[in-house]
């Protein structure tokens, strides 16, 4: 057997992993529902933009950022099927995303774009 | 787009190309964060207009309206979101190519060509919106040279547009393969990788739409 | 079953079938990670010598007060290119030579995950290196420092073509590093042999993995900073135009968000090499292996939160200064842990003081000095005194020369027998080490004093009577001695390649997987994929490991005889890389070149992606 170099030496375990990864995708109904949710959130966002009292209120910015984050997470989890996929991919994505987000926030502080929102 | 090298042993049981595309997407996070950071750092710092959300009157007395066109961009945002929906359906169609299809609905859902076409067309529509936006901005007096807003806005959205363009070319290539020999479950990984890229570009736009267009 | 004649598969492919041919073509079309590693090694050594000669010219100019060997302009070009060359064209690619050669061998793989992408990375590096190096011979080289601070580098203040070479050249080199990083991340995650768990991975592979992650996250930032500069210079955007309200610190922040991780990109591979050399020469496993892994990861992670310590002098305010000072001091902890673990590895070992071991010990000593001076300017008040003086020059040369270069030399002496099958000459190696060690300290230690006495960086000459003369003279003498020691190394390298003592598979009795196969390794690396049960399979392995090791030592069998499928050789990665560089050249010559380059790029890329990597498997 030693002469057969590409015989898969320990095929069982990883293959099982792959199986889980490949065959737990949601069906098209879920995808359409997700699409509807994304559309609804987008309408909500644009609606908020056009209501002066909302724009003037304190919740405008946090609300829009939250809505955007929800859309972001929804696409990543369902359409990019990170929710169902191997956890390695989650690490490969969330690690860099975290560093990117922290870099963005630090830069905004350093350039004084965030300071004004604290204190008063 | 070569056939998966199934005979090669891998430690995780996953295909190497999928690991690479996720690493690439992680890297792209830093790329777009650099662009978005710069846009935000320069927000409100332009010395001359036109401005994104405010009226500007120059020393000569000319008045420039807020330049961002929210209705048009909302439409293009919706188009890009729908392209992501079409993309997941295309991937599902490729993965389920071998399943029997009895009803008309199943045949429609199972047509990878239809959904790939749909994705590519919606992507192209988005690019059309962007081209319209860019040219109208230039007509209204905002170019990439006008002010800090112009430089950072056109570079950020232009980079995103370039990514969409690359994605459309990728989709068209997949379509060409589909027409030549048909995409089947064996190609699911190739379509999956293209889809991951496509959704990521969509996700970036979700952030840009809020940060650039909606936040005043 | 094994002896049955198998129908020769893929006979119709014989023209392009992979085999160990020689000749120029075989190198141009190679996708073998070992050959690509060797190409990296030779190219990077060439650039190392070029960068070294640039430094010698600088030292000749500064040897005494008011010398006129070089004009101010030429001096600017030389220090810019010395830094750029050593960082991007010498140390990073020397590390890449080891990534290429060693990672697949250390994890028990036949090649990297994407062999053709690997070739592409090398060719982009070569062409980009030539692109950025050639101008110095026409006195047109970049002249604003390796950090290229904007707005100094904008068209307004640097109207010439010099900075164009720098902006475009770094952009090209970034593509090479990024492509290689995706490749190695995937390789290390996915191509480990059975049983090679993460916590059994050799330390060099671990540190390389951290480095690839750093590249993937840091290079996009400088890519964007360079895109802004490129757009400012070529298309009239305002990212760095102060008159339009641009912030003069934007470039500095973006650059150092990349720049600080970059110093770990430069040093961690050397740390990895030393972590292989010291156990082998102390005949003891690495002390505190898990802590070494975690400290490496921690160095990498913290490395993204310290960048503004390069900017204490710009006046960021007390809060920002304090935050970055604290995070910078924190990073000293995992680094110190590494130093102590190396000492722990050597403690009570029966150390063989080979040339490789000497260089590794040299790193431990000299990097510590550089680390300590680094901790000094982690403190903003101290940094305000030291910044932009020769004290900083002394600091980072202890880290980069005393650290990275010493580590890489240790790696070369250690792995030369694996790469070539022959040992490097030990007496010459020891002369090289001692001369190098003395000359290095002679060159860089006096710079601490010159800096403390106020000598600024980047000045092309100085008046006497400021107390700097003697220190500069000593530094220059040290630099000339470094030329001699490097010449001895180069002589030893080429002499040993032809006439060195035959090494055998494992001349150092080392314990890791790469020593279980012949030297030089066959094109397929491992006849059978090894089964790994411990961190040092050749030291602690059970009978099963030994059996696979013995199988792997059956020399002289071809891949064909063993039925191992290897990728085709192909010239396409080279063509794609060339087309990309031609496209970039269009920016500074004629726009037509951009279209020609783009057309060839797209065509050859499609041809690459649509052609199979290797013969169909049956
Ligand atoms: Cu630093």
Image: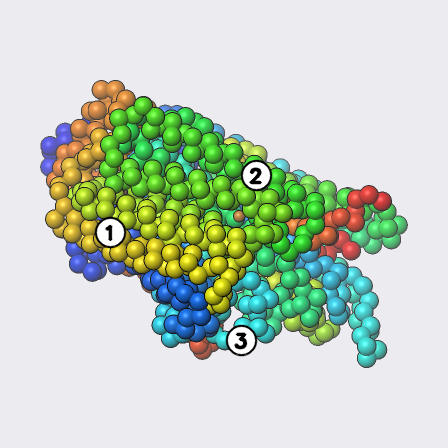
Q: Residues within 10 Å of mark 1 (few under 14, many from 20)?
A: many
- Label 3 resides on the chain identified as C
Q: Which mark is residue C329?
A: 2
| Picture quadrant where residue C129 is located | bottom left
- Residue at 61% across / 52% down in the picture? C384
Task: State the SS at label 1.
Answer: helix
Between C233 and A79, the one nearer to me in the picture: C233
Residue B105 in sight from this viewpoint = no
Quick check: B147 above or below C175? below
Q: Position of residue C141 (x, y in %)?
A: 43, 70
Between C421 and C100, the one nearer to me in the picture: C421
- Residue at 41% across / 73% down in the picture? C68
Between C48 and C393, the one nearer to me in the picture: C393
Figure coloring: rainbow
Residue under disc 1 on the same chain as residue under disc 2: yes
Check the picture and name the quadrant holding the C terminus of chain B: bottom right
Residue under disc 3 on the same chain as residue under disc 1: yes
Q: Residues within 10 Å of mark 2 (few under 14, many from 20)?
A: some
User: Label 3, on which residue?
Assistant: C159
- Residue at 62% across / 37% down in the picture? A30
**Label located before the other in sequence (1 or 2):** 2
| Camera-side mark, 3 or 2 | 2
Cα separation between marks 3 and 2: 40 Å
- Label 2 resides on the chain identified as C
User: Label 1, on which residue?
Assistant: C489
Task: State the SS at label 3.
Answer: loop
């Amino acid at each position: 057997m030693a002469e057969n170099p590409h015989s898969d030496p320990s095929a069982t375990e990883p293959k099982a992993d792959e199986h889980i990864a490949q065959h737990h995708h949601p069906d098209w109904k879920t995808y359409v529902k997700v699409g509807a949710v994304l559309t609804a959130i987008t309408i909500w966002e644009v609606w908020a933009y056009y209501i002066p009292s909302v724009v003037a209120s304190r919740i405008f910015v946090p609300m829009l950022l939250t809505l955007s984050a929800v859309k972001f997470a929804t696409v990543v989890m369902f359409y990019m099927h990170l929710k169902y996929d191997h956890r390695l991919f989650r690490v490969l994505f969330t690690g860099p995303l975290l560093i990117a987000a922290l870099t963005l926030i630090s830069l905004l502080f350093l350039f004084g774009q965030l300071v004004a929102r604290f204190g008063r | 787009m070569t056939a998966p090298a199934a005979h090669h042993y891998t430690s995780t049981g996953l295909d190497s190309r999928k690991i690479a595309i996720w690493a690439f997407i992680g890297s792209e996070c830093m790329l777009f964060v650099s662009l978005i950071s710069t846009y935000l750092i320069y927000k409100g710092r332009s010395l001359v207009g036109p401005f994104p959300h405010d009226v500007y009157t120059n020393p000569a007395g000319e008045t420039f309206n807020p330049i961002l066109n929210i209705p048009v961009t909302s439409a293009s945002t919706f188009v890009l979101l729908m392209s992501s929906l079409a993309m997941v359906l295309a991937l599902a169609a490729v993965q389920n190519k071998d399943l029997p299809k009895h009803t008309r609905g199943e045949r429609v859902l199972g047509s990878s060509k239809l959904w790939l076409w749909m994705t590519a067309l919606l992507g192209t529509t988005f690019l059309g919106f962007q081209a319209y936006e860019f040219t109208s901005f230039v007509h209204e007096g905002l170019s990439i040279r006008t002010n800090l807003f112009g430089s950072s806005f056109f570079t950020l959205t232009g980079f995103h547009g370039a990514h969409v363009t690359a994605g459309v070319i990728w989709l068209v290539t997949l379509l060409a393969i589909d027409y030549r020999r048909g995409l089947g479950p064996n190609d699911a990984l190739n379509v999956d990788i293209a889809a991951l890229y496509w959704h990521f570009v969509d996700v970036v736009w979700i952030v840009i739409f809020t940060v650039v267009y909606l936040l005043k | 079953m094994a002896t049955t004649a198998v129908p020769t598969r893929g006979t119709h492919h014989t023209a392009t079938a992979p085999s160990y041919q020689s000749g120029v073509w075989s190198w141009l079309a190679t996708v073998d990670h070992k050959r690509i590693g060797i190409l990296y090694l030779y190219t990077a050594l060439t650039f190392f010598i070029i960068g070294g000669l640039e430094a010698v010219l600088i030292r000749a100019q500064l040897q005494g007060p008011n010398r006129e060997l070089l004009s101010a302009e030429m001096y600017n070009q030389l220090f810019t290119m010395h830094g750029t060359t050593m960082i991007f064209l010498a140390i990073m690619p020397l590390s890449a030579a080891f990534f290429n050669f060693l990672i697949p061998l250390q994890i028990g793989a036949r090649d990297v995950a994407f062999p053709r992408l690997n070739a592409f990375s090398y060719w982009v590096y070569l062409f980009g290196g030539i692109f950025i190096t050639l101008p110095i011979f026409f006195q047109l080289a970049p002249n604003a420092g390796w950090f290229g601070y904007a707005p100094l580098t904008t068209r307004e203040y640097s109207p010439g073509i010099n900075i164009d070479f720098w902006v475009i050249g770094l952009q090209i080199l970034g593509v090479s590093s990024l492509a290689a990083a995706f490749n190695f991340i995937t390789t290390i995650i996915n191509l480990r042999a059975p049983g090679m768990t993460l916590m059994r991975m050799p330390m060099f592979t671990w540190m390389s993995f951290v480095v690839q992650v750093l590249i993937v996250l840091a290079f996009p930032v400088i890519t964007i900073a360079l895109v802004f500069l490129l757009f400012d210079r070529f298309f009239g955007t305002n990212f760095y135009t102060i008159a339009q309200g641009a912030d003069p610190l934007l470039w500095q922040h973006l650059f150092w968000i990349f720049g600080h991780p970059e110093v770990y990109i430069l040093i961690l591979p050397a740390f990895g090499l030393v972590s292989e050399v010291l156990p082998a020469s102390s005949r003891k496993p690495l002390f505190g292996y898990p802590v070494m892994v975690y400290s490496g990861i921690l160095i990498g992670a913290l490395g993204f939160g310290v960048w503004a310590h390069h900017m204490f002098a710009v006046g960021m305010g007390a809060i920002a200064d304090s935050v970055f000072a604290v995070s910078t001091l924190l990073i000293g902890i995992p680094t110190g842990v590494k130093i102590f673990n190396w000492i722990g590895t050597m403690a009570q070992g029966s150390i063989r003081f080979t040339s490789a071991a000497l260089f590794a010990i040299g790193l431990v000593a000299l990097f510590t000095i550089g680390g300590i001076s680094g901790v000094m300017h982690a403190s903003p008040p101290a940094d305000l005194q030291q910044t932009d003086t020769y004290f900083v020059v002394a600091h980072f040369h202890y880290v980069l020369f005393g650290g990275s270069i010493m580590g890489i030399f240790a790696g070369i002496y250690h792995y030369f027998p694996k790469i070539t099958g022959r040992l490097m000459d030990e007496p010459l190696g020891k002369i090289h080490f001692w001369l190098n060690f003395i000359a290095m300290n002679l060159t860089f230690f006096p710079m601490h004093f010159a800096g403390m006495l106020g000598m600024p960086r980047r000045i092309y000459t100085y008046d006497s009577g400021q107390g700097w003369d003697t220190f500069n003279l000593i530094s220059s003498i040290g630099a000339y001695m470094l030329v001699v020691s490097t010449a001895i190394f180069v002589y030893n390298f080429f002499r040993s390649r032809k006439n060195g003592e035959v090494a055998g598979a494992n001349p150092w009795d080392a314990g890791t997987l790469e020593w279980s196969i012949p030297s030089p390794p066959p094109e397929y690396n491992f006849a059978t994929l090894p089964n790994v049960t411990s961190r040092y399979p050749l030291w602690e392995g059970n009978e099963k490991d030994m059996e696979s090791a013995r199988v792997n030592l059956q020399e002289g069998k071809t891949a064909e005889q063993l039925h191992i499928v290897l990728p085709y050789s192909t010239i396409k990665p080279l063509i794609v890389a060339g087309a990309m560089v031609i496209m970039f050249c269009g920016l500074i010559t004629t726009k037509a070149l951009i279209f020609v380059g783009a057309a060839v790029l797209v065509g050859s890329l499609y041809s690459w992606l649509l052609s199979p990597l290797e013969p169909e498997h049956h």
